[in-house]
Amino acid sequence: MPARRAGGGLAGGDGLNDKPIENLPMMPQRPAAPAGAPTVYIETYGCQMNVYDSAAIAALLGRAGLARGDDPLTADIVLINTCSVRDHAEHKVLSRVGELRRDREEAGRRPAVMGILGCMAERLGEALTGERQRIDVVVGVDRYESLPGILTAALAGSGGAGSAVVTGHRDDAHYVAPPQLYPQNGSHLVTIHKGCDYRCTYCIVPYTRGPQREKAPAAILDEVRAVVAAGGQEVTLLGQNVTAYRWRGELDFAGLLTQVARVDGLARIRFLTGHPRDMHERLMDVIGAEPKVCPGLHVPGQCGSDRVLARMKRRYTRAEYLHMVAYARRVVPDVTISGDIIVGFPGETEEDFAQTLSLVREVGYDNLFCYTYSERPGAPAVRLGDDVPADTKKRRLAEVMALQDEVWQAIAAAQVGQTWSAVAEEPARRTEGAWRLRTLNNRKILAPLAAGVPGRTYRVRVDGFRNTSFFGTAV
Ligand code: SF4
């Protein structure tokens, strides 16, 4: 995994990004759709929550008799599951819609029923059905169960642009049924809650995903048991802010981890994304003591200056963040820390930025996602004004990334000669005979395996690293 990644402008979400996600590795459709059934192509952008939702939507539509289509040029219905976390992410989706329309026209295909799902649907709603965008179906994150009916109507011509906009948050923790089981890099995604109550001032997520609503522990455990029954060994517990999980005052995230760890046959538990405020000592004690919980912690610090952290409403101080990191290193064996940094938040001075640089140096991140701040309409920070000049943001982004490279080189060099346990994920695409493996603490290594088996653990000696990847030899 890269030691650092850059983003053009983050406007919300911890551990979220706006990268288009390659077409999902979905399981074969069961039961198979009837011959001649209309086909649905789904393209996914954003975070792992969208990956999970897209798979659940595909399963829902499959049960409603629609067939999965792999080609946006021939599918009867094209759905795009979207991200609003950055302005850039939204523009990308809109230009993708235009591109798909043009490609179909040039290929002599009739127009597809075009749908926008997810955060953009929630944020923009009706606006997407206007003359300019001409989207037929707009369905928000809490309303996917309405899709089969809406799409059937749209196919029959009784829908029409502007007639199918279903958005708005539900009070209950309603979930579409879990997806057919599928692994992402060998790990099965299990969403444990929706939304977020924290309202960090730069973030649009609480407004697009709504307030935090938990999935019942029994439902989570059923999903995990189903993963194991289907041969899976690893789950990734997912949520906007998983460490804030709290079921009716009875069970918090530490308790949930303990219960999930008791599922027989499950080998590994990962989770995304943790909030530093909720990464309290008792939780870290559980993570450190439970061998099934992987010790790779993603805890976005976002900034090293207390003044800016307060303006971001992050609910922790720099000292508290550093204490959390130090405690994790004390009680969680082999722990690695990854995080997110935003530069150029409104009012960020050179002194504030220097504090961020010193935080990055002090923490020693394995992996850092770095972004420049950009405004999102509707997020509270808009009121603060976007007053850091673009070239200053750009320069600070370059500086923090250069520093992270330096930090990473030192961390990586110290690994050479060590022997790791790592789980085989898949054959490497470019190196014949090599496999991609991942350690429990989330480091990636390439090593030749004679007859690699996905999900099996191997001992691998680290021979070196190139840029941001390790390579080694199975021992
Ligand atoms: S904690 Fe919630 S409000 Fe804050 S960045 Fe994460 S998703 Fe956004």
Image: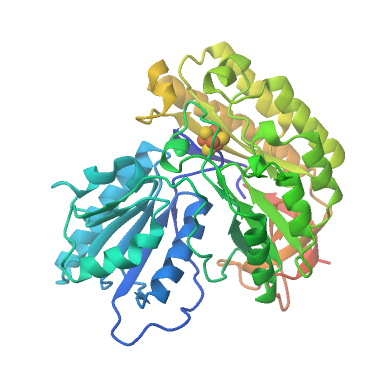
Horizontal arrangement in the rendering, residue 115 relative to residue 183 (left or right) = left
* Residue 44 image offset from top left, x and y in percent: 41, 57
When asked about the image quadrant of residue 327, the answer is: top right
Q: How many marks?
A: 0
* Residue 460 image offset from top left, x and y in percent: 79, 62
* Residue 91 image offset from top left, x and y in percent: 30, 43
Which corner quadrant holds the C terminus? bottom right
* Residue 194 image offset from top left, x and y in percent: 53, 47
Quarter of the render that holds ligand 1: top right
Query: Can residue 324 be seen by looking at this rendering?
Result: yes
Horizontal arrangement in the rendering, residue 118 relative to residue 430 (left or right) = left
Above or below: residue 415 compared with residue 33: above
- Say which of 357 and 471 sits in front: 357
Horizontal arrangement in the rendering, residue 33 relative to residue 411 (left or right) = left
Above or below: residue 341 compared with residue 459: above
Horizontal arrangement in the rendering, residue 103 relative to residue 398 (left or right) = left
Query: Can residue 385 be seen by looking at this rendering?
Result: no
Above or below: residue 336 compared with residue 400: below
